[in-house]
Amino acid sequence: MSEDEYARRGIDLDKPNPARVYDYILGGRLNYAVDRMFADQVLAAQPNARERAQLNRQWLRRAIRFGMDQGIRQFLDIGSGMPTVGHVHEVAHAIDPTARVVYVDNEPVAVAHSEIVLEDNENAVMVHADAEVPDDVLEHETTEMMLDLDQPVMVVMALFVHFIPDERDPARLIAAYRDALAPGSYLAMSSATPEQQTDGTARAVAMYQKSANPVTPRTADELRALVDGFEILDPGIVFIPEWRPEDGVPENPAECGGLALVARKN
């Protein structure tokens, strides 16, 4: 894009952005110098950050396949970032090309690149909205066109809720999405955690605290409180690689730095 196009889309290249930083850590190309500089600092503090990102992406794929196995054919990915390789629509469409996927993000670069990637995919779309305003997401004309909320949906919040501090009431936010869902819907969530973490993790979190997007790591009990009204499914709230593993679990699963869960609205 030209500088004029950056300005037209409201893209701020003066500050690192979580979606672009995550893309860089995953090895993607949808990022800029300011994101790479910040990510390199995170990697210096937490050298296994790339492995952590890959473990979260692997969990996401397992969660989507689980949803497909339960008959889910509608997915709402909140705070999705860029739909890079192995994202929700690719996993779902490998099983059923008619499955419908709505990505939601408020970051202009994520939206712009997602629109390009998804241009020829009639069953996967990007909605430019603030996920912390559920009505703006759920009542968006594109969401209403793609998803039938009278039928079960899987809502995905992968490494999203830890960017919402307690003062912005993440429990109320999640409850708003829950109340809009039909019975038989699911919530797939992962989050950074302080449980069993090292000094390197603490340093990386401290770096985010100084950025425009501070992180609030949460314990399993804190995450459990956020999903009140959902039934948390086996194996419960566990370290990310422990959630229904397909290829074994690392010797120290806590090194992933995050917890994961899938829950159902009954």
Image (cartoon, grey):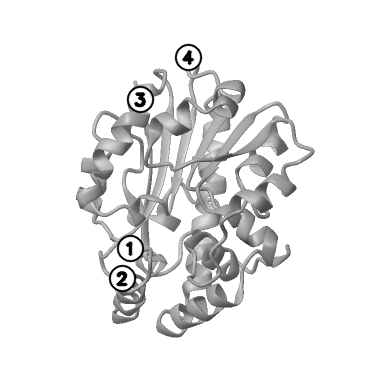
Q: Who's the residue at 57% across and 53% down the image?
A: 108
Determine if residue 86 is in view.
no
Cβ–Cβ under 8 Å for marks 2 and 1: yes
Tell me the quadrant of the picture where the N terminus can be found: bottom right
For marks 2 and 3 on the same chain, the one whose residue lies earlier in the sequence = 2
The residue mark sitting in front, 1 or 3, is 1
Q: Which of the pair 1/139 is nearer the observer?
A: 1
* Label 3 neighbour load within 10 Å: few <14, some 14-19, many 20+: many
For marks 3 and 4 on the same chain, the one whose residue lies earlier in the sequence = 4
Please name the residue that numbered disc 1 is placed on. 215
Please name the residue that numbered disc 2 is placed on. 209
Q: Quadrant of residue 58?
A: bottom right
Q: Secondary structure at mark 2?
A: helix
- Give the side of residue 73 with respect to residue 263, left or right: right
Please name the residue that numbered disc 3 is placed on. 265
Amino acid type at mark 3: Lys
Please name the residue that numbered disc 4 is placed on. 150
Q: Who's the residue at 35% across and 28% down the image?
A: 178
Q: Which of the pair 38/58 is nearer the observer?
A: 38
Looking at the image, residue 228 lies above or below residue 214: above
